[in-house]
Image: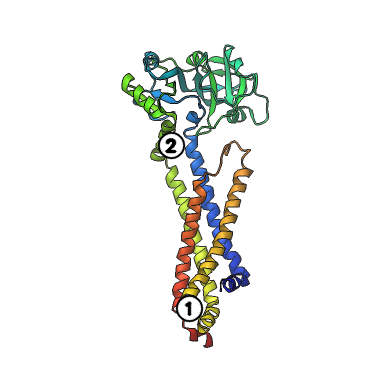
Amino acid sequence: MIWIALRMLTGDRQKFYGLVFGVAFSTLLITQQLTIFANLLERGASGVYNVPDADVWVMDPATRTIEVAYPLPSTALDRVRSVPGILWAVPHLRATASVRTGAGNLEAVAIVGVDDSTLVGLPPRVAPGKVAALTSPGSVIIDDVGAGRMFGVGNPVIGQRFELNDQRAVIRGVTDSFPNFTNQVTLYTRYSEALSYVPGTRNRLTFILVKGDGAMTDQELAHRIAKISGLRARSSEQFADDAIEYILENTGIPMNFGITVGLGFIIGVAIVGLTFSLFIRDSIKQFGALKAMGVSNKAIRRMVTAQASMIGLIGYSLGLVGTALFVWGFSNSATFKGFYIPWQVPLISFSAVALILAATSRIALNRLMTTEPAAVFR
């Protein structure tokens, strides 16, 4: 009976292709939008991901995320270093500044000051031989996305000079780092150099990066630091989650993407439901004939379930392939750099497709269950 049901479905090619297209389009829309949404959220925590050496981030109690920080006094570094269980603790500065390029253009940039001696805070993927160049006065390393924005994709970057808050800066290297949430140009330099680039205020130490000695978990170490120093301490994982929660609570991104995903679901129900209902209506004589030959309602349910499952599997697979091609096709674009499909997204899409098909199948079955076998003879 299952074979007969599938033959009935594929026999009407126009409606079969329409059903597959509806499921595929809904899957593509839902999966693509959820993929972009998840990756944008992770970009909010890119500053944390770019410093994999740090186990704990220490900050002022008023600081909420890596982008919304209140500076610490310089004495806070010694207070943190005195906490037992710490292998090392180094200063970390993050601030914004304005850059005037050689062409006279202004560009807002993020300044990241890394530890002078260890260079902890610098992203790990820097061109070989360029890290040591930071020891030269006025040297900075720029992220690859920012380099493309400031100087154009493919143009030479190393050796470019510009004016940074009335100070001379020279690009000595390019880093392959995670772009930030706004794709802002990021410049990395030594902590002592960064102090001369940012406006002079009484306190300019933004964060303290801590590495534990391995005697306790990162969360336990963060709790100990907070208890002894009186500062806010978060493990890298916790601080990344804080950045994501901040975006969820203070931006309209969740609502915007939620509306798009909801529209994808509604479109799927409309297209698949209407087309499947038309298919069942046109096939009512065949199902009536099967009932007249003694086929039970239970068998009819299995046949409709098989038809819906076939449509769902083909359409869902095509939608996932379309999303994968989208991510792959734009992987070289700075806007979509580092984008990937989280494993949770296909599961959510599969659940949405299953719900769409369950709803449309239910509607179709209600009509079939009330069809009398004698209808085939009318």
Mark 2 Cα shell of 10 Å, populated few (<14), some (14-19), many (≥20): some
Residue 144, image x, y percentages: 60, 29
Q: Earlier in the sequence, mark 2 or mark 1?
A: 2
Q: Is residue 361 above or below residue 103?
A: below
Residue 227, image x, y percentages: 31, 23
* CA distance separating discs 2 and 1: 53 Å
Residue 233 vs residue 21, the one in the foreground = 233
Residue 211 vs residue 355, the one in the foreground = 211
Mark 1 Cα shell of 10 Å, populated few (<14), some (14-19), many (≥20): few
Residue 163: name its quadrant. top right
Number of numbered markers: 2
Q: Nearer the viewer, mark 2 or mark 1?
A: 1
Q: Residue at x 58, y 24 (%)?
A: 142
From the image, tell me which residue sits under label 2: 244
Q: Residue at x 50, y 24 (%)?
A: 53
Circle 2 — which element? Answer: helix
Tell me which amino acid carries mark 1.
Answer: Ser
Residue 99: name its quadrant. top right
Q: Is residue 271 above or below residue 12?
A: above
Q: Residue at x 52, y 44 (%)?
A: 342
From the image, tell me which residue sits under label 1: 296
Quadrant location of the N terminus? Answer: bottom right
Tell me which amino acid carries mark 2.
Answer: Ile
